[in-house]
Amino acid sequence: MSEACETVSSAEIETCAARWLERRDRDNWSQTDQSALDAWLAQSPAHEIAFWRLDAAWSRTDRLIVLRDPKQDIAAPARWRVPAWAKMAAGFAALAMLGMAFASLQKPPQDRVFTTPLGGHETIAFADGSKIELNTSTILRARMTSDERTIWLEKGEAFFKVKHDAAHPFVVIAGARRITDLGTEFSVRRDSDQLKVAVLEGRVRLGSADAAASARVLTQGQVAAATAEAMVVTRRSVQSLANELSWRQGVLVFDETALGEAAAEFNRYNREQLVIADSSVARLVIAGTLPTNDIEGFARLAQTVLGLHVEHEQNNIVISR
Amino acid sequence: MEETRDTSREDAGSRVAVSGADLRAWFIAEVLPLEAALMQFLQHNWRNKSDLADLRQDVYVRVYEAARREIPHPAKPFVFTIARNLIIDRVRHEQVIPIEAVADLDALGLAKDEPGPDRIALARDELRRLQAALDRLPPRAREAVVLRRIERLPRREIAQRMGITEDTVAEHLSAGMRALANVLYSEPSDLRRKS
């Protein structure tokens, strides 16, 4: 951050951390910004802890998006109605009331929000013949009208099977990036500022959300890892792409995958979390296919095949030597 | 995922055994949910209320340093032992309060590792708790947070709606972030149920 950030007391550190988090939440967050943030975090554990804490609280508010009620949006008075908030405080009917309060904000009436919980998997079929499959912990907003087909991937991962229509392009917006369908099947995964686009069939155009200028066309078998600024494109084998999308069949496929990476994949789907006790264990390489919710099976495998020590602790399964 | 792998590779040669990503995940899942109880403990054992946030930070830093070598299980007795030791150190250093003032951990029931209502309730009542938290924010910060997190509007549009500059929106949002973290982590969980 360019301005001076006093970090002597815990309150000052927290203020700085909040400023960083607020900046990172913007769409124009760049690689340079990330490096500056990393440097600030590396200065002191206190910085890191303050940032983790705020970040964790802020991510929890992701859930609040379910309070958007598209059905109530049609008669939208332009002004924010304060009394609705006061009423909300009164009680638990809050959910319904919030819907009304937020309905008073202007928003195109056609948007619909779809979410999946942890471990969830849902398919939405649209009238135009396109289908979207939502993976675990995913939030997306859809505006599907006669002249616009736009999806905002707010969080998580989805697989798109698009009915191509050149006159009405199908567009997925994920943070600072825009993905335009050119007749295709593709998946998009969004982890905060990191985006991964995999093209299973046909082609897509991947550009920035604002301008169509620096766009790049991805073809079948290509996978792009992108941030707001940078993009790396690799070509993958059919098999490796299929593994990547195995969640659609409710399984995770590991093929020479590091244990730590496999555990992180499982942790996307389950409340119970795998904890790998040390980095030498995390680097062990495994192969296999398991249902996304079979965290126990994974632990058993680690125990019997790799001879590791497995311990259940509250919501964690700790794997060590 | 990439990050985890890189970090562990980096750690291979050094004495630090726990990767940054693992430490962070553990801290968020295991330590932060204890914060309300930790704040109560600190409050009971320290007179000057204005020191509490600094004390909490010091406890967290000590927890972090120790967990970097090996993640302790279970977390609860570990965190409270560190908190007690910190208070004893401070008391010795400042020579103000007699050591007896430091309550016995066992008497407070904090050394035992019970899942505690927080964690279980967290999953169940998350949305309700978030709504209650929103409701407790200062009005302008709350409005900014609602427009950002529920309406998902960009800064520019939030500024227009609220009739303020984008910089002021940023200020309201960061104030909202701090207030949310305090309500979600520091305050006793029974605030959650207001119905």
Image: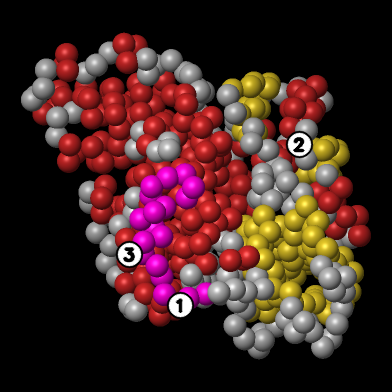
Reading the image, the residue beneath label 2 is: A293
For mark 2, give the secondary structure. Answer: loop
Q: How is the image coloured?
A: secondary structure
Mark 3 touching mark 1, by CB under 8 A? no
Which residue is depicted at the point 34% across and 50% down? B136
In front of the other: A178 or B11: A178
Q: Position of residue B173 (x, y in %)?
A: 38, 63
Please name which of the two marks, 1 or 2, marks the residue nearer to the observer.
1
Q: Which mark is residue B140?
A: 3
Please determine if labels 2 and 3 lie on a single subunit.
Answer: no
**Which of the marked residues, 1 or 2, is nearer the chain's N terminus?**
1
The chain holding disc 2 is A
Q: Position of residue B13 (x, y in %)?
A: 56, 40
The chain holding disc 3 is B
- Stretch of the chain drawn in magenta: A76-94
Measured Cα–Cα span from mark 3 to mark 1: 18 Å
